[in-house]
Amino acid sequence: MIDDEKYMRRCLQLARNGQQNAKPNPMVGAVIVSSDGRIIGEGYHVRCGEGHAEVNAFASVKPEDEPLLAEATIYVSLEPCSHYGKTPPCADLIIKKGVKRAVVGCVDPFAEVRGRGIRKLREAGIEVEVGVLEKECEALNRRFFTFHREQRPYIILKWAQTANGFIDDHFKPVQISNDFTKMLSHKLRAEEDAILVGRVTEERDHPQLTVREWNGSNPKRLVIDRSHPLNLESLYAHQIQSLIVEGGAKTLQSFLDKGLWDELRVETNLGMTVGDGTRAPQIPEEAVVEKTIRDGENQLVCYHQITPES
């Protein structure tokens, strides 16, 4: 099991390389290990529409190592696909290559797979182990999992506040972020599908909501008000897997009140206070700190929701 975890961690490391271009497909890594513990092939899903991680891993095996496949183990962070999409089923390829064993990080929630790939491998006589580093594998693709399990985007609520808990200065915009945390915000935008603000923020602040200090595509821009409410079903239908909500306070609070959030990103300028203004939302009790980033007097805290598995 210790060795299984070691190779699965390598799968996760490889999978993250597909963060920008694999969407809307999940990030997946694959590693092929010979019976003596040597990695003879590895790969990840580079780009949507192109070869999956398993395809790239087998393609990397040197001709002189091909005979080793009969006693080899393939490690995959996500269940191999079992259906024809833009590429042939990876489960069929694994069977064709004749490996002895397969270790799968987690089951694919996508309706076309959902256990079928694992079943196909077992029916072909391949020994299959499921659930190695399962939580880590699911966390890597939590946007993909949320989208398919709950049929809505993964929702990130984000705001910046002063040390005494205001998001503006006497109801006027104020610069709270520093250069580093602003860059992190733009990095986040490059990684997510859409970004949303309320009408008041749009009219008062005229936010650009673009990627200017990071490399990547701009997220889809959304503005809501009473006459244009948020329609999660529409976002799901348009394949928007992740959504950043940047405020203001009423918009953020409306999501918090409904429990419609998966992650919070709260930046606090510990060296700034104001006399009055718009109060920042309160962190809900079910929020658990995931990580903290500090740069000078600016502190960014990321939270996730308590779940039965947390």
Image (spheres, grey):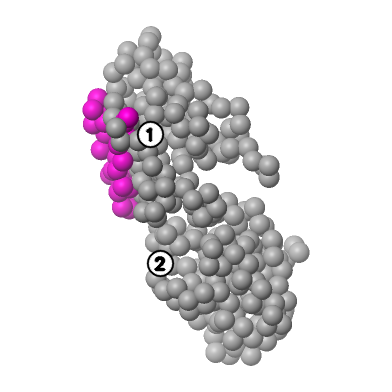
Please state the extent of the stretch shown in magenta in the rendering.
202-226
> Which amino acid is tagged 1?
Glu
Q: Residue at x 48, y 76 (%)?
A: 84
Q: Tell me the residue that label 2 is attached to.
A: 48
Asked if one can make out residue 11 in the rendered structure from this viewpoint, the answer is no
What label does residue 246 carry, if any?
A: 1
The spot of residue 73 in percent (x, y) is: 67, 76
Expressed as whole percent of the image width and height from the top left, the position of residue 182 reads 36, 36
**What x and y, as percent, mark residue 116?**
61, 71
Q: Please name whichever residue, 147 or 288, is drawn nearer the observer in this view of the structure.
A: 147
Q: Is residue 254 above or below residue 90?
A: above
Where's the N terminus, which quadrant? bottom right
Total tally of numbered discs in the picture = 2
Residue 263 lies, in percent from the top left, at 51, 39
Q: Is residue 9 left or right of residue 299?
A: right
- Determine whether 303 is above or below 11 in the image: above
Asked whether 288 or 236 is in front, the reply is 236
Q: Residue at x 50, y 61 (%)?
A: 27
Q: CA distance from mark 2 to mark 1?
A: 28 Å
